[in-house]
């Protein structure tokens, strides 16, 4: 067995496939370590304001590597971590605070969104804030006045009154547009958000955070809920490989042992196994899984159990039966019986190991089949609703019209990983088949 596996080094396709699988395994291990299970679930379910500082439907950052692309990245400024903040006592408990948040904008396109987050401290009387926007060409634009409550957000991009003052352009465009340009294009240079607030209580304070959302983010971009798709791709790799491996191991080993038991005992045991196998072969697996996911549970563990049960009595059991019929007549089997070996010992230690070399190539190619099955169920909306998986990403992309809206990266990431998985295991499986199958060794 080990000698045969060592022969894989003679096949370049096997080495390429092995490199692909090892890479995917490394990605899966890194994802599980870098993002623990509970953290991955919390991030993907997106409760609270986890992703509030991420742009919506942003492309991956690597698109800027292509010539001519200089799309904006997200800029986050806070009075607590930078900028200028001056507090001055006017009279009694009345104080004024002036916060200046400046940044250099050098991108070729406009931001996707603008948000202001206020964090005031007060007991009864909320601070009053006046907001101004200073442009590189010296203009001072008034954003408006407001009283800010606890943890309040000002969605600048949704301010229709501000949009009307900016000639009908969305605020994220009008505030950055070059008035001297014949067409809409951003004016590059230093921008400043100026917040002037009045505090009416002793001990009151005010902090402001400005988020200028970009059009690119991370290695895989973001979706319609601002979630970083990288989380789903990393954890999806671990889920896909684990699902495929467990399903392949569970179904293959059980099939092998049941076929050996049927051949060894013969009679009604063998006949019963063959009848169950023939019945199972005509049952449609995918509709059964859809029925279970619709009426019972979409948990990945339930689906995994059903997949293994349906895979045990597959057509492979007849192939193994034909091989075991020959193995049963081997001289060393007769010798083991003469020495008083028990039935289970003969089946598990003498018969099954002889068939494992035949099992290995099919076992390797069976893993990606189960990976694609899990992804297919998720694309149909029957995947685990909790776990971030490749199929769930594709399902979200389909439901939100990603391809029609031009969000190709949303589909490209999980699709490429699925193809790499299938290609890697197929290349190894075909090479193993040439090694273990005597009729293919000389081809």
Image: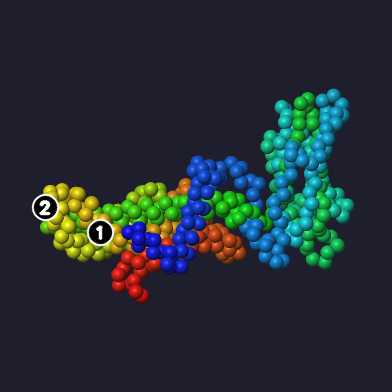
Q: Mark 2 touching mark 1, by CB under 8 A?
A: no
Residue 294: assigned label: none
Query: From the image, which quarter does the C terminus lie in?
Result: bottom left
Which quadrant holds residue 333?
bottom left
Q: Is 357 left or right of 199, judged from the image as shown?
A: left
Residue 3: percent from the left, percent from the top?
A: 35, 60
Query: From the image, which quarter does the N terminus lie in?
Result: bottom left
Residue linked to disc 1: 354
- For numbered disc 2, what is the local secondary structure? helix
Tell me: residue 434, above or below residue 71: below
Whether residue 127 is visible, yes or no, is yes
The colour scheme of the drawn protein is rainbow
Residue at 37% in and 56% down:
290
Q: Is 132 left or right of 293, judged from the image as shown?
A: right
Residue 44: percent from the left, percent from the top?
A: 53, 47
Residue at 23% in and 52% down:
349
Instruction: Answer few, some or many: residues within 10 Å of disc 1's Cα (few below 14, many 20 plus, some between 14 and 19).
Output: few
Residue 338: assigned label: 2
Q: Is 387 left or right of 348, judged from the image as shown?
A: right
Residue at 13% in and 57% down:
334
Instruction: Answer few, some or many: residues within 10 Å of disc 2's Cα (few below 14, many 20 plus, some between 14 and 19).
Output: few
Front position among marks 2 and 1: 2
Q: Nearer the viewer, residue 107 or 176?
A: 107
- For numbered disc 1, what is the local secondary structure? helix
Q: Earlier in the sequence, mark 2 or mark 1?
A: 2
- Label 2 to label 1, Cα distance in Å? 19 Å
Residue at 56% in and 53% down:
229
């Amino acid at each position: 067995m080990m000698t045969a596996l060592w022969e894989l080094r003679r096949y370049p396709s096997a080495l390429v496939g092995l490199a692909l699988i090892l890479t995917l395994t490394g990605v899966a291990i890194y994802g599980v370590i870098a993002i623990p299970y509970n953290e991955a679930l919390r991030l993907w379910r997106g409760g609270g304001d986890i992703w509030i500082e991420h742009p919506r439907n942003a492309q991956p950052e690597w698109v800027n590597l292509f010539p001519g692309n200089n799309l904006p990245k997200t800029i986050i400024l806070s009075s607590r971590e930078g900028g200028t903040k001056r507090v001055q006592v006017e009279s009694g408990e009345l104080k004024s605070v002036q916060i200046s948040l400046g940044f250099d904008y050098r991108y070729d396109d406009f931001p996707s969104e603008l948000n202001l987050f206020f964090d005031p401290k007060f007991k009864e009387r909320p601070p009053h804030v006046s907001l101004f926007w200073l442009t590189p060409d010296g203009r001072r634009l008034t954003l408006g006045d407001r009283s800010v409550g606890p943890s309040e957000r000002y969605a600048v991009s949704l301010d229709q009154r501000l949009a009307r003052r900016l000639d009908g352009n969305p605020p994220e465009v009008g505030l950055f547009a070059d008035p001297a340009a014949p067409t809409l294009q951003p004016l590059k240079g230093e921008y400043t958000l100026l917040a002037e607030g009045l505090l009416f209580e002793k001990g009151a304070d005010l902090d402001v955070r400005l988020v200028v959302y970009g059009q690119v983010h991370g290695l895989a971009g973001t979706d319609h809920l601002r979630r970083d798709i990288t989380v789903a791709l990393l954890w999806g790799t671990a889920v896909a490989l684990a699902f495929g491996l467990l399903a392949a191991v569970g179904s293959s080993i059980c099939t092998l042992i049941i076929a050996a038991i049927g051949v060894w005992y013969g009679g009604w045991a063998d006949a019963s196994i063959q009848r169950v196998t023939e019945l199972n072969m005509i049952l449609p697996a995918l509709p059964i899984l859809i029925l279970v996911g619709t009426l019972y549970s979409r948990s990945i563990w339930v689906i995994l159990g059903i997949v293994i049960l349906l895979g045990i009595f597959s057509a492979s059991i007849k192939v193994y039966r034909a091989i075991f019929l020959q193995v049963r007549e081997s001289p060393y089997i007769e010798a083991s019986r003469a020495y008083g070996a028990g039935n289970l010992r003969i089946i598990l230690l003498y018969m099954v190991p002889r068939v494992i070399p035949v099992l290995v190539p099919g076992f390797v190619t069976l893993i990606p089949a189960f990976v694609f099955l899990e992804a297919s169920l998720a694309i149909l909306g029957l995947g685990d609703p909790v776990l971030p998986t490749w199929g769930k990403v594709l399902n979200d992309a389909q439901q939100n019209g990603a391809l029609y809206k031009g969000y190709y990266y949303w589909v490209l990431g999980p699709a490429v990983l699925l193809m790499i998985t299938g290609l890697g295991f197929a290349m190894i499986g075909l090479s193993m088949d040439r090694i273990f199958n005597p009729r293919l060794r000389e081809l």
